[in-house]
Image (cartoon, rainbow, N blue to C red):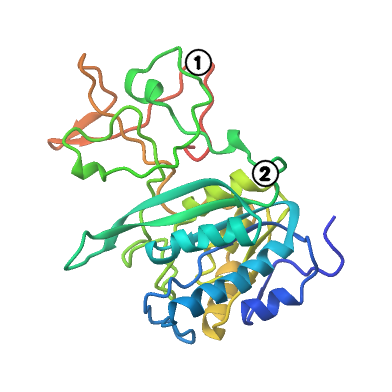
Amino acid sequence: MLPVKLKVDVVLNQDCVHAMSRLPDGVIDLAFADPPFNIGYQYDVYDDHREDDEFVSWCRTWMGEVVRLLKPNGTFWLAIGDEYAADLKVLMQRELGLHCRSWVVWYYTFGVHCKYKFTRSHAHLFYMVKDARDFTFNADAIRVPSARQLVYGDARANPQGRLPDDTWILRPQDLPTGFQPLENTWYFPRVAGTFKERAGFHGCQMPEQLLGRIIRACSHPDQVVLDPFAGSGTTLAVAKKLGRHYLGIELSADYTREIRKRLRGIRSGDALDGAPEPLVSAPTTAAGRKLDTRVHGRHSRRPRTPTKGQKALPGLD
């Protein structure tokens, strides 16, 4: 039953702090926030050039509102860059009373090239809960194939697969033999300008498959998902596709208009855009056993067909 005063399946064109301050306590099941990183990105209305203390103070304010809005068993995911990851993790735990379940590093292709340091191709995803013992985590909804399934075709492998890792790895093209047997990470490509998935009006669009994993794991159908920095609208789009209610807040009038347009073209039950999750890749084993084929002289990866009694894993259908 939805709270009487909470209007859902809408996008509010307001400042997030102001908008959240007008909402009642304890009405949100899952919040996902991908705020400005304070790295000088050019937005249409937001100034991404703040002094460090000012930025952290602002984050304390809006995150405090998110925590207030969460139900007692609610979940909060924060996406942030290197510059403030440590500061905000400490703030969430010590000042806002949240508990960290996982510190996920999302590796993406099409990284930000740099001249005087290693090219950046990752972001930090903090999985925080309000109650350390009472929270939603739908493990079976996000399982991925294990190394025993992919590499060895081992009948002893758990047919349900395994939970994804929360650690970062080198890119597959950086490894001489490709992925190693125990690797299975958050490998989702960044939504680059040439991708069909790209909405086209926002420069920091996250992939639907990544949000799909988070929303499947940390909420149930008909629950409410909040995004206080709606941006390109991906969180809201995925929530709608997966049968959740959504509430988006966006400062930019232009972005808000485009988000609403995007959402009008989506129905509950629609497939998520982007490459299937996770990227399935299996190396040749020492015994010469492999599950790939050669096409035009290059390896073409293909997922293993489930054996009798095995179920197709979520996200791989």
Q: Which residue is mark 1?
A: 308
Q: Is residue 12 above or below residue 82?
A: below
Q: Residue furthest left?
A: 297
In this rendering, position of residue 84 left or right of residue 160: left
Q: CA distance from mark 1 to mark 2?
A: 38 Å
Locate residue 300: give its quadrant.
top left
Depth check: give the residue in front, 316 or 215.
Answer: 215
The image shows residue 255 at horizontal and vertical percentages of: 52, 79
**Nearest the camera: 69 or 266?**
69
Which amino acid, mark 2?
Ala
Q: Pick out the residue farthest to the front.
A: 94
Which amino acid lies under the numbered mark 1 shown in the image of this protein? Answer: Lys
Give the numbered dot on residue 132. 2
Where is residue 291? Give x, y as percent. 29, 24
Q: Residues within 10 Å of mark 1 (few under 14, many from 20)?
A: few
Q: Is residue 224 above or below residue 141?
A: below
Drawn side of residue 229 relative to residue 80, left or right: right
Q: Residue at x 54, y 68 (%)?
A: 233
Q: Is residue 115 above or below residue 222?
A: below
Helix, strand or loop at disc 2? loop
Q: Quadrant of the N terminus?
A: bottom right
Residue pictured at 44% horizontal, 57% vertical: 207
Residue at (31% x, 65% y) in the render: 194
Residue depth check, mark 1 versus mark 2: number of the one nearer the observer: 2
Local secondary structure at mark 1: loop
> What residue lies at 39% left-to-right and 66% top-to-bottom?
83
